[in-house]
Amino acid sequence: MKNNKKIFAGIEAGGTKFVCAAGNSLGEVIERETFPTTTPKETMACVNEFLARMDAKYKLSAIGIASFGPIDPDPKSPDFGHITTTPKPGWGHFNIVGSVKEKFNLPIGFDTDVNGAALGESRWGNGQGLDSLVYWTVGTGIGAGGMLAGKMMHGLIHPEMGHTFVNHDRVKDPFPGVCPFHKDCLEGLASGPSMKARWGVKSATDLPADHQAWDLEADYLGHAMANCILTLSPKKIIIGGGVMFRTELYAKIRKKTKELLNGYIQHRLILKDIDNYIVAPGLGNNAGVCGALAIAEASSP
Ligand code: ZN
């Protein structure tokens, strides 16, 4: 049992904001502050100032960084700790771990935001007790991470399931997609920005509940979930992110996933209890930053 008197800092590094927190081994968030993502210099100055205050107040045991990607999470690689090919100005090839390490002589854990969220859900949320789960975020971007046999998913780099390819019926949906790398990958067709561009709205969640956009969205996400189940066979799938604030999507995604699998995966959870298999994050709005805390906890001796 880990000592829950230890206090950790977690940094959820996102494309629009950084959420920073101090918390303990029970997953309790004690302090929480948010900074806009501007330039690395400006944003990291706010982050390091927050960390210095928390360290003075609580004597931190470790720091966890859960970052938007792609990143290099391999400690043996010369680019370890870097954000790599992001189109976000100023952040490409930025050494985010290094910029914290030069100020704090503490263990620093580093992983993707979605691997972090999966770890946080397995510690304190809807994945407790599971050694295998996948966490998806559907918002400004789409990404997924998770654990298999108790280990976070790392391979050559890390999974980028948000950029996998799904059936795109151009008669039903002539929209070309918004991914700068692939056009009509999953993120290109189903992220918040793709919904905004396709339907000409300010925010995807402005679309009324009976708009055809939601069936189309569930169609793409259903393909992604079916592919995820067929490829990784996770024991649970957790879907968070801004687009999922439209909670009626969950039922639509479950239905489409079942329809596509068509009885092929013979497991009770999928056949009879999919409502408890594809679920929302148990940690709600704190899923991301609790993920960063879980990364910190895991890196603490
Ligand atoms: Zn893509």
Image (cartoon, rainbow, N blue to C red):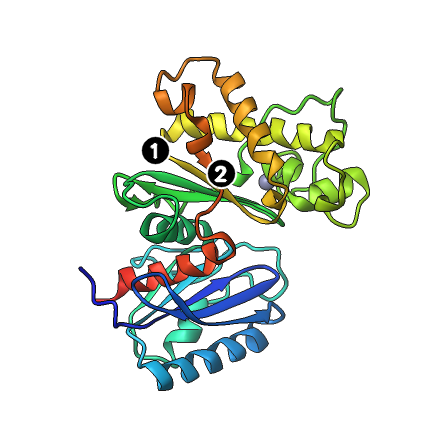
Q: Identity of the amino acid at label 1? A: Lys
The percent position of residue 232, horizontal first and vertical second, equals 37, 31
Q: Residue furthest left?
A: 1
Q: Between residues 117 and 159, which one lies in front from this camera angle?
A: 117
> What is the crowding at mark 1: few (fewer than 14 residues within 10 Å), some, or many (at least 20)?
some
Q: Residue 66: which quarter of the image?
A: bottom left
| Identity of the residue drawn at 52% across and 30% down | 224
The percent position of residue 202, horizontal first and vertical second, equals 78, 50
* Relative side of 141 to 55, left or right: right
| Identity of the residue drawn at 36% across and 16% down | 266
* Relative side of 148 to 89, left or right: left
In this rendering, is residue 215 above or below 154? Answer: above
* Relative side of 104 to 2, left or right: right
Real-space Cα distance between discs 2 and 1?
A: 17 Å
**Circle 2/circle 1 CB separation < 8 Å:** no
The percent position of residue 160, horizontal first and vertical second, equals 48, 42
Residue at the spot of label 2: 161
Secondary structure of the residue carrying numbered label 1: loop
In this rendering, is residue 197 above or below 20? Answer: above
> What is the crowding at mark 2: few (fewer than 14 residues within 10 Å), some, or many (at least 20)?
some
| Identity of the residue drawn at 50% across and 20% down | 258
Give the label, 2 or 1, closer to the camera: 1
Residue at the spot of label 1: 235
Image quadrant where one finds the N terminus: bottom left
Q: Identity of the amino acid at label 2? A: Met
The percent position of residue 75, horizontal first and vertical second, equals 31, 59
Secondary structure of the residue carrying numbered label 2: helix
Q: Residue 89: which quarter of the image?
A: bottom right
Image quadrant where one finds the C terminus: bottom left
The answer to whether residue 277 shows anywhere in this view is: no
* Mark 1 vs ligand 1: CB below 8 Å: no
Res. 153 mark: none
